[in-house]
Structure formats: structure tokens, C-alpha cells
């Protein structure tokens, strides 16, 4: 039986954003001057899409080379790192665009293409869920003691290692949090920030598992110890 490989189909986020920006510019030109509410929406859509583009480029040029060096891996699918940086607050942007263009003759994207963009933050969460699982297993591998009398400490040590506070510190060292793609209006509390930082670390370990397998996960557990 061959080993099942986890993968993610290409979403082509950057290409889709270019298409959407062109469509928005055209919509703006065709919209009557007295439709101020729509013009305000168009301006906001344009601003947010350009902000996403900037962050995607930062991830490509700054974050990915840094992670490759730290983790001693080559990240094969650059887009997957971009995907895990999408936060739930980005969903509304793509929902609004989908709703606006759904019945327009000049709809720039197919329904399934909009669906991919709308689901970006959910995809990020699933990859983080995978990372959470392999981190748990990897930490157990590192802490395991063959002598039965020495294993009692494992549960407590593991709990401390995978705590949000501990994971947040690693997130800061890797510089993940500042690369999030989000439109959150409020400043979250400390507990929420630590949770979000921990989730980002989990997502990176999910990517390691997807692209390089569990052996490489175990090698990189050292960053948590």
C-alpha cells in the first residue's frame, strides 16, 4: 500500500486578486456618479485587495526564505504558506464581492473560484489542525522514556510545551504574527493573541507534514523544546 500524501489544490490567489482588481476598476468607471454608496464600497474593496497583495508579497519575499532557513527545508508550495496567513476577517471581503458580481454579466470569477477565496481562512484552520496533531505526536516522540517509572512526567511536560503561551513565543521568534492577512477592526486581548499565534505555529508544522513528512516534523520539534 502506497503512502497517502496530503496535498492542496492550487488556488492561484494572486492571479484571482489581479482579476478582481481589474473588474472593480471597470465597475467603478461604469457606475453612475450619484451612486455614492457603491463607490464607497468599490474604494474599500480596492484598498483591501491591494493590502492583501502587499502582504502576500511580503510572505513570498521575506517570511518564506526565513522559514526555509530556520526549518532547514525547501517550501515547495509557496501559496500554502500564504493561505495559512488568512484570518477569518478576510471572508467578508470575498463574500461581498461574490454577492455583488453573482448576477452580473461581467462576473470576473466562476462560482467555485469565489468559493475558494471565501474558504481561505477555513483552509488555514484545517492545516493548523493537522499541525496540532503532528506537534502532539512529535513532542511525545521527543519526551518518551522507555523506563515505565520515568514516563509520569510526560503529560505535564507536553502540556507546557504545546501551551498557547509557549507557542506564542515561538511565533514571535519566527515572525509569523505580523504577516497575518486580516481586517480585524479591534485589538484582541492577550489570550486571543496567544491563541492566534499558537495556531500560526501549528499551521507551519502542518505544512512541514504535508510537504516533507513526519520525520521532518520530529526534527523541527526542537524549536518547541
Image: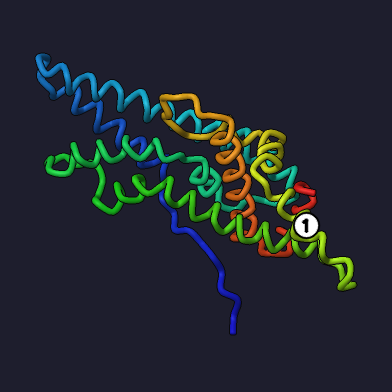
User: What scheme was used to colour the molecule?
Assistant: rainbow
SS for dot 1: helix
User: Is residue 122 among what the camera can see?
Assistant: yes
Q: Position of residue 52 (x, y in %)?
A: 43, 32
x then y, percent, for residue 91 = 35, 40
Q: Say if residue 65 shows up in the picture.
A: no
Residue drawn 37% across and 49% down?
119
Where is residue 214, by image quadrant?
A: bottom right
Q: Quadrant of residue 81?
A: top right
Foreground residue, 118 or 108?
118
Front one among 142 and 61: 142
Choose top left, top right, bottom left or bottom right for residue 3.
bottom right
Q: Quadrant of the N terminus?
A: bottom right
User: Which residue is at 45% across, 52% downward?
Assistant: 123
Specify few, some or many for label 1: CA neighbours under 10 Å numbering under 14, 14-19, or 20 or more: few
Front residue (pair 13, 182): 182
At horizontal 30% and vertical 36% (from top left) the residue drawn is 20
Q: Which residue is mark 1?
A: 219
Residue 114 locus on image (x, y percent): 29, 47
Amino acid at each position: 500500500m502506497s503512502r497517502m500524501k496530503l496535498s492542496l489544490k492550487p488556488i492561484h490567489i494572486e492571479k484571482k486578486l489581479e482579476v478582481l482588481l481589474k473588474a472593480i476598476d471597470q465597475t467603478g468607471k461604469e457606475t453612475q456618479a450619484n451612486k455614492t454608496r457603491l463607490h464607497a464600497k468599490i474604494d474599500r474593496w480596492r484598498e483591501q485587495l491591494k493590502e492583501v497583495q502587499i502582504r502576500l508579497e511580503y510572505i513570498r519575499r521575506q517570511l518564506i526564505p526565513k522559514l526555509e532557513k530556520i526549518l532547514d527545508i525547501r517550501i515547495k508550495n509557496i501559496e500554502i504558506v500564504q493561505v495559512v496567513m488568512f484570518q477569518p476577517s478576510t471572508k467578508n471581503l470575498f463574500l461581498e464581492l461574490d454577492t455583488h458580481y453573482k448576477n452580473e454579466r461581467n462576473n470576473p470569477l466562476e462560482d467555485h473560484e469565489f468559493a475558494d477565496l471565501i474558504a481561505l481562512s477555513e483552509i488555514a484552520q484545517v492545516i493548523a489542525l493537522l499541525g496540532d496533531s503532528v506537534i502532539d505526536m512529535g513532542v511525545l516522540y521527543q519526551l518518551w522514556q522507555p523506563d515505565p517509572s520515568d514516563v509520569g512526567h510526560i503529560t505535564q511536560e507536553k502540556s507546557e510545551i504545546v501551551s498557547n503561551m509557549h507557542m506564542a513565543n515561538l511565533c514571535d521568534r519566527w515572525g509569523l504574527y505580523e504577516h497575518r492577512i486580516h481586517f480585524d477592526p479591534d485589538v484582541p486581548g492577550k489570550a486571543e493573541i496567544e491563541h492566534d499565534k499558537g495556531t500560526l505555529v501549528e499551521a507551519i508544522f502542518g505544512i512541514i507534514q504535508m510537504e516533507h513528512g513526519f520525520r521532518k516534523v520530529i526534527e523541527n520539534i526542537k524549536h518547541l523544546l
